[in-house]
Amino acid sequence: HMNFECSVGLGSLDLQQNSSSSLWNFLKRLTYRFILFGFVAVSAVRLLRIEQGGAFADLLSDKGRNAMRNEMDYVERTLGFRTKDLEDRDIRLVSYIVGGAVRWRRYLDHLVMSLCNEDKTFRDMQPLLLQILRIGIFEIIKLGMPPYAVVDENVRLAKVSLRPGAGNMVNGILRKLALLKEKDFLPLPKVEGDERAQARALAIIHSHPVWMVRRWTKSLGQEETVKLMNWNNTDPSFCLRVNPQKGYTRSDLVKMLNDKQVPHEVSIYLDDFVRLSTGLQAIIQAGLLKEGLCSVQDESAGLVVAIVDPLPGETIIDCCAAPGGKTLFMASQLRSRGTIWAVDINRARLRVLKETSKSQNVEEVITTVHADLRLFCVNNLMKADKVLLDAPCSGLGVLSKRADLRWNRRLEDLKQLKQLQDELFDAASTLVKHGGILVYSTCSIDPEENEERVAAFLCRHPEFTVDPVHGFVPPGFITVEGFCKTDPVKHTMDGSFAARLIRCADSCW
Ligand SMILES: C[S@@+](CC[C@H](N)C(=O)[O-])C[C@H]1O[C@@H](n2cnc3c(N)ncnc32)[C@H](O)[C@@H]1O
């Protein structure tokens, strides 16, 4: 049956040359609806959308089916034909291929460029053709898929969605690549020459921006930088946090994971957390997230909450709260007693927080405030026991989870972010009562966004001192200055930073 569909598809390719375009389009739509390159076509269109600034939406989310329908409409509008609907397994493959092709973009483009006969061919390449090649190379090199199948599928897609010549080009490049891979002779640069040349080579081999490689090499050394890039390129793993406010315990979750045969490990750092490397789909389908029994939350975020140490009855201000990961965890620890003011400038993300707080049964202790923290502080006389500033940052600690982030960050962004972080830090400090606690955190591993921001803050605010985080988190995370730092390579979790500061109890400050 499948061969028949393929051969119908291939047969109709020949028609293209001899028929009028409307007849061709009609036949194309009729025929290609059924042929097999659904997931490559969907992946290619998704990659185009991402590059044009479209959402990096996850088809595996709860709204997966709706998202899939929209996705198929995009495919039809972009390619001029509709592919067959995808099964759940295909959807997972699309997400995997798209994530991989985004993450490995620099590496893949280097190979495409090296295998083109002229530089100009690469420079002038149609965007869709480039995506088809990136996907093909990713499948052959990184997924180890059989080259003949990849060549067949990607050539057909290029022919039908572009033109026969494009198919020939895909054929030539992918075949050459497969041959070079077999001989272990891929055209990759050697790590040699001066510091800049080495960084350029490493940036291609490990698919990162050159500025990141140079920055990390300076602070961490080359060996650690390579380890970090390898981590960023691994498939992300996830953690689930159970929600005791719904009466759901870690043992309940572990039992459910065992029943569904989802491989997992309980967190050795945090009581309510369980680590998963795969199987998130089963959790979504079982409705655990929707019903508020669990949330997806990295242990690094959980450690920040452990440092805030929310206690029942306290007033806490979460200054940059949305979409609410830490607010909701803190709220569950208040055991229905106390208040969290969840402030954020982003209304849509705050709405998500509010909705989730209902499903997690913690809404009674949360009040959302839509405001720029800097203005909120000017007009507000409120003082809290504890204030969390989970500052907007570069996200350099979460590159394994956010495949596209490395390409969206520029060195110049760090400068702007630093200024914003300082302003928010100053604003947040005005909300802390005498003797109260201010926690500054980021999901960055960059000292300029972390230790340096705290040092600068302490110079401006002698009324605050460092309250070392001993006793709040395990010793392996604590720096000599008493801050908490998670290291993706060492701790196999997202990179993050948190400092706990205490405001002098003396009211003369
Ligand atoms: C790192 S995210 C916070 C993540 C959140 N704490 C969590 O655990 O889910 C930073 C947040 O800061 C917010 N933000 C940025 N500038 C802000 C400002 N001037 N005032 C208030 N919130 C701001 C962003 O909208 C974003 O939601």
Image (cartoon, rainbow, N blue to C red):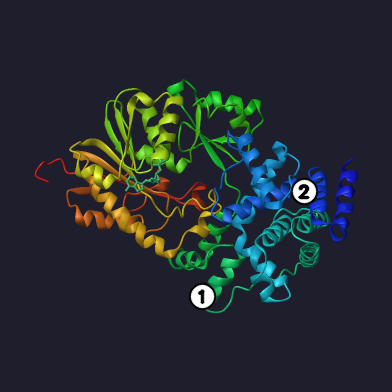
Crowdedness near tag 1: few (<14), some (14–19) or many (≥20) residues, C-alpha within 10 Å: some
**Quarter of the picture for ligand 1?**
top left
Left or right, 382 with respect to 53, comes to left
Q: Which residue is mark 1?
A: 196
Badge 1 marks a residue whose secondary structure is helix
Q: Residue at x 81, y 44 (%)?
A: 30
Q: Residue at x 65, y 25 (%)?
A: 259
Rendering coords of residue 475 (x, y %)? 39, 45
Left or right, 154 with respect to 266, comes to right
- Residue 164 is marked as none
Work out which residue is located at the far bottom of the displayed protein and give it.
Answer: 193
Q: Quadrant of residue 203?
A: bottom right
Which is nearer the N-term, disc 1 or disc 2?
Answer: 2
Q: Quadrant of residue 61?
A: top right
> What's under tag 2, amino acid-wise?
Phe
Q: Quick check: can you spot residue 21?
A: yes
How many numbered callouts?
A: 2
